[in-house]
Amino acid sequence: QVQLKESGPGLVAPSQSLSITCTVSGFSLTNYGVSWVRQPPGKGLEWLGVIWGDGSTNYHSALISRLNISKDNSKSQVFLKLNSLQTDDTATYYCAKEDYGKGGFAYWGQGTLVTVSA
Amino acid sequence: DVVMTQTPLSLPVSLGDQASISCRSSQSLVHSNGNTYLHWYLQKPGQSPKLLIYKVSNRFSGVPDRFSGSGSGTDFTLKINRVEAEDLGVYFCSQSTHVPPWTFGGGTKLEIK
């Protein structure tokens, strides 16, 4: 079955970079896109960006200068890199996959909490 | 970007009651292909969001028929009949008609009165 799992550093210092890996199973990254969504503690959901099966990407306009999403199809891994972190980047970061036939993000990872603090 | 506005922010209910959550979009969510990509999610404490309803009114796999979605254009409603304890959490609406970006409502917390 479809599964996604994030792994991240937990704590990042301000101005540093964040790298998170999403490892997927049950589908091929060459055929499906994977999005990143984040959620600050106690707040709502914010879509960050997507990498499509062909490797093309779309990013949220507010993050386009700091965000990079890439992948390794052979390892079934998607990578998020966010530069110049500030305290308001503190959030749980999720990778998610849409159900193309139905619509909506039908599959989510368990999320990884990233705290930006000195 | 499409702005999604949910009301109310908090919804205290008694178990067995009916609950209703509203979601309004800043522009019509009817896609050029005729579909309306408005979805509902439930996030229980400490868990990832889970898809409940897709394309306005379709229940995702395993979702009880106590949940129903309706609406069109820019106004949508999620109804929960006979609320059970397992239904408590935060409900989010979301659109995937005008993407990118995918956008979410601010959330409605369903809690015990």
Image: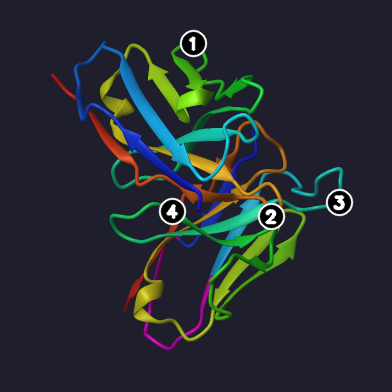
Q: Which mark is in front, 2 or 1?
A: 2
Please state the chain letter of the residue tagged with numbered disc 3 in the rendered image: B
Q: Do the residues labelled 1 and 4 touch (CB within 8 Å)?
A: no
Q: Residue A102 carries which label?
A: 2
Marked residue nearer the N-terminal end (2 or 1): 1
Where does label 4 land, which residue? B49
Q: Does the magenta stretch include residue B8?
A: no
Amino acid residing under circle 4: Pro
- Dividing the picture into quadrants, the one containing residue A33 is top right
Q: Viewer-proximal residue, A104 or B12?
A: A104
Q: Which mark is residue B34?
A: 3
Where does label 1 land, which residue? A65
Residue depicted at x 34% and y 42% = A111
Amino acid residing under circle 1: Ser
Q: Are marks 1 and 3 in contact (CB under 8 Å)?
A: no
Q: Position of residue B16 (x, y in %)?
A: 42, 89
Q: Residues within 10 Å of mark 4 (few under 14, many from 20)?
A: many
**Region of the chain picked out in magenta, as a range:** B9-20
Asked if one can make out residue B89 in the rendered structure from this viewpoint, the answer is yes
Q: How far apart are marks 4 and 2 (CA)?
A: 17 Å
Q: How crowded is mark 2: few (under 14 residues within 10 Å), some or many (20 or more)?
A: some
Q: Which residue lies furthest to the right in this view?
A: B33
Please state the chain letter of the residue tagged with numbered disc 4 in the rendered image: B
